[in-house]
Image: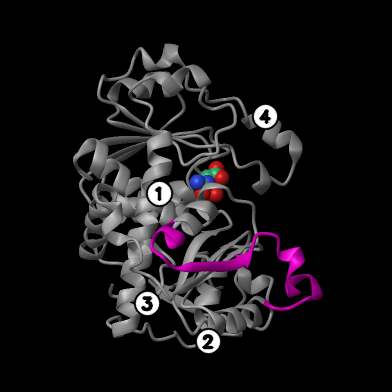
Amino acid sequence: MNVRHLIDLNDFTTADWHRIIRLAQEIMEKPQDYYGTCQGKLMATLFYEPSTRTQMSFQAAMHRLGGSVIGFDNPLNSSVSKGESLADTIRIVSGYTHLVTIRHPVEGAAQAASRYSSCPVINAGDGGHLHPTQTLTDLVTLTKYKGTLQNMTIGLCGDLKNGRTVHSILKALSRFPNKFILISTKELALPAYVKDILNASGCPFEEVYSLEEAIPRLDVLYMTRIQKERFSSEEEYERQKNVYVLDRKKLLRARADLAVLHPLPRVDEITPEVDSDPRALYFEQAKCGMYARMALITCLLQDDASRSFKEIPLSHPRNDIKCTNPKCITNHEPSLPHTFRENGGMFICEYCDERMILQ
Ligand code: NCD
């Protein structure tokens, strides 16, 4: 891999993605050939936020490779409850392990962790920002079931504002010639920074309200959960929660070769009657996630042992500028250096991607 950590999948080259996808396919075909390949290696899973699939598929992946896992899934049982900073927790845990996987409710937390870690860090979801290993899972699934990552019309439906899986998959699939149909209410529309990425990629995209109208045109439908935990009011969540429900009737209008994906967990946005439709691939997708993570762990550990990655130099800290995103890690851990990329008069927070124009 060209970089040491997986914080944003777009930090990797397309060749890196293909290497991981190919390896995931090989492991899927002959899992027994890979048992024991990470023997003696230790991975930490630090889950500051609830998780079933991501946490367990990482743990299963490491165990299947013959490695071991330590960690917590309730930070209140760790020294976090005594007020320990993220930076200190990572300094300590990375000294015990060969790989750290972190999920955190605050945006930019994995980026911050990578700055204090002595081993590779994997972002397993940072607030509503990014979820790169879900996207790897999605890329492995699409390669397996659609045979391609390009020339598709891809509909994304639901909470496009807060869904980190949506932001990550759009960033990744806009590297290839694809068309996107963004299906959401106005309140849950895609954030401007992801739209800017789509505009820069040259991939056409449309924002629409109706799933019924969009569905006949799609090769892939990526359904998402309304992210209740990211809403500031219960009333707003109640207004949004049942707007989009995929059921058998809507699927009647879809192509025979549509692929229905969902990062899961689902709440009410796909009715259980859809599960038996051959186009419903979300349970297979969850299984692909374990193989994608086995491949990722293998590649990161191999490259770390041979130090065949590029260190990204830290930008110059600008502690005179404060990120305006209240959900950014720099507003939760005051001792972190504030760093920004500059682009056309704009300052972009290197942790959470917030864009700011200074007056
Ligand atoms: C997703 C997440 O945590 O962002 N779940 C997952 O990791 N598969 C999607 C979600 O919670 O809605």
Residue type highlighted by circle 4: Arg
Q: Is residue 244 left or right of residue 315?
A: right
CA distance for labels 1 and 4: 32 Å
Q: Which sits earlier in the primary sequence, circle 3 or circle 4?
A: 3
Q: Quadrant of the N terminus?
A: bottom left
Check disc 1 and report the residue beneath it: 289
Check disc 4 and report the residue beneath it: 239
Q: Which sits earlier in the primary sequence, circle 1 or circle 4?
A: 4
The residues colored magenta run 61-85
Check disc 2 and report the residue beneath it: 317
Q: Quadrant of the C terminus?
A: bottom right
Query: Is the residue under label 2 in contact with that under label 4 (CB below 8 Å)?
Result: no
| Discs 3/4, front | 3
Query: At numbered mark 2, what does the secondary structure look like: helix, strand or loop?
Result: loop
Q: Which sits earlier in the primary sequence, circle 1 or circle 2?
A: 1
CA distance for labels 1 and 2: 36 Å
Residue 313 rendering spot, x and y as whole percentages:
39, 86
Q: Is residue 179 left or right of residue 194?
A: left
On whether ligand 1 comes within 8 Å of the CB at mark 1, the answer is yes
Check disc 3 and report the residue beneath it: 4
Q: Nearer the viewer, residue 126 or 292?
A: 292
CA distance for labels 1 and 3: 21 Å
Residue type highlighted by circle 2: Pro
Query: Is the residue under label 4 in contact with that under label 3 (CB below 8 Å)?
Result: no
Q: Which sits earlier in the primary sequence, circle 1 or circle 3?
A: 3
| Discs 2/3, front | 3
Residue type highlighted by circle 3: Arg
